[in-house]
Amino acid sequence: MKIVKTISEVRAAVKAWRAEGLSVGLVPTMGFLHEGHKSLIDRAVKENDRVVVSDFVNPTQFGPTEDLASYPRDLERDATLCENAGAALLFNPEPSEMYAEDACTFVDMSGLTGELCGKSRPIHFRGVCTVVSKLFHIVAPDRAYFGQKDAQQLSVIRRMVRDLNFDIEIIGCPIVREADGLAKSSRNTYLNAEERKAALVLSQAVKLGQKLAADGEASADAITTAMKELIEKEPLARIDYVKAVDAVSVEPVSKMQPPVLVAMAVYIGKTRLIDNFIYEG
Ligand SMILES: Nc1ncnc2c1ncn2[C@@H]1O[C@H](COP(=O)(O)OP(=O)(O)OP(=O)(O)O)[C@@H](O)[C@H]1O
Ligand SMILES: CC(C)(CO)[C@@H](O)C(=O)[O-]
Ligand code: BAL
């Protein structure tokens, strides 16, 4: 596996593969890779001749008071995981390689981003759409892989690909969890032992919501209220949002008319974690 830092090196590698008629998969990440990322890479390796993993903590998707500076990084460990998983190329650019100092073109969306993380992090999806568009242009993959853990991101990327006619298949991959249920996340490393225990309240709320929906509760409000009540019992937890939305339009729903995305962001101490489930009926 090659580790490259420039756009021209990525383009040269992809051009050579294309000349051989090979297919290409892309797994965009912000690094500090774990089993969740590995599940995306594994799937990409199965479905494509060559896989590119991007490892870039994208500054434009972080708000001014967010954790850009402290976001965990470990390129060496990431490279080992990617190589063992069978990736062909790890793209780890510096911010200056991705963004000219006078860059003034961004990809923004007027829908799908008004609720959930888009509401709490107002510039977030503009940054995500911009960097993912750039990665799509740089790598020009056949398929790109995203986790269901970032459910709104997946809906946003699907819509962007449709609206901007990217000729790329978007593959959504299921949430990978720790043995006790906590969704794997690079930000879990911020948690101390007490917070790690408290963080279980997110997956417990997911399980409760799933059970209520499966048992036939038709009111989205009844489900999210029960989930909030459970989370509020945990003293270290502070709810950012727990909300039910249409999984495609990301607009709030009152009835559990599938497909419904029930998503949450919860602070455990200072760490903001997300989790969700989709009710398919
Ligand atoms: N537990 C997981 N299961 C499945 N996919 C995941 C999981 N965690 C992250 N991903 C996916 O990996 C890709 C890269 O995500 P990212 O690098 O932000 O990882 P992360 O661990 O979610 O980090 P963060 O702490 O920022 O939430 C995204 O498509 C994301 O949805
Ligand atoms: C898609 C992504 C790599 C864009 O920076 C990021 O938002 C992430 O890791 O989910
Ligand atoms: N996986 C989402 C990246 C972020 O929180 O910025």
Image: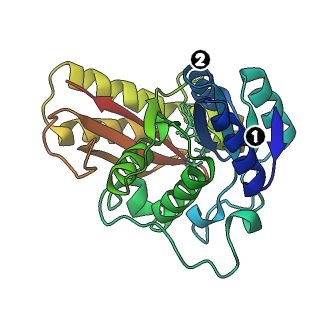
Q: Who's the residue at 38% across and 30% down the image?
A: 206
Residue tagged by mark 1?
A: 90
Q: Name the element at disc 2.
A: loop
Residue 96 occupies quadrant: bottom right
Indicate the quadrant of ligand 1 in the picture. Answer: top right
Pointer 1: residues within 10 angstroms few (<14), some, or many (20+)? many
Q: Is residue 210 left or right of residue 104?
A: left
Residue tagged by mark 2?
A: 179
Q: Where is residue 170 in the image (x, y as percent from the top left)?
A: 44, 38
Disc 1 or disc 2, which is closer to the eye?
Answer: 1
Q: In this view, does 29 lie to the left or right of 161?
A: right
Sequence-first disc among 1 and 2: 1
Q: Which amino acid does label 2 sit on?
A: Ala
Q: Who's the residue at 33% across and 26% down the image?
A: 208
Pointer 2: residues within 10 angstroms few (<14), some, or many (20+)? few
Residue 24 occupies quadrant: top right
Q: Name the element at disc 1.
A: strand
Q: Position of residue 9 (x, y in %)?
A: 78, 50
Q: Position of residue 198 (x, y in %)?
A: 56, 35
Q: In this view, does 212 lie to the left or right of 120?
A: left
Q: Which amino acid does label 1 sit on?
A: Leu
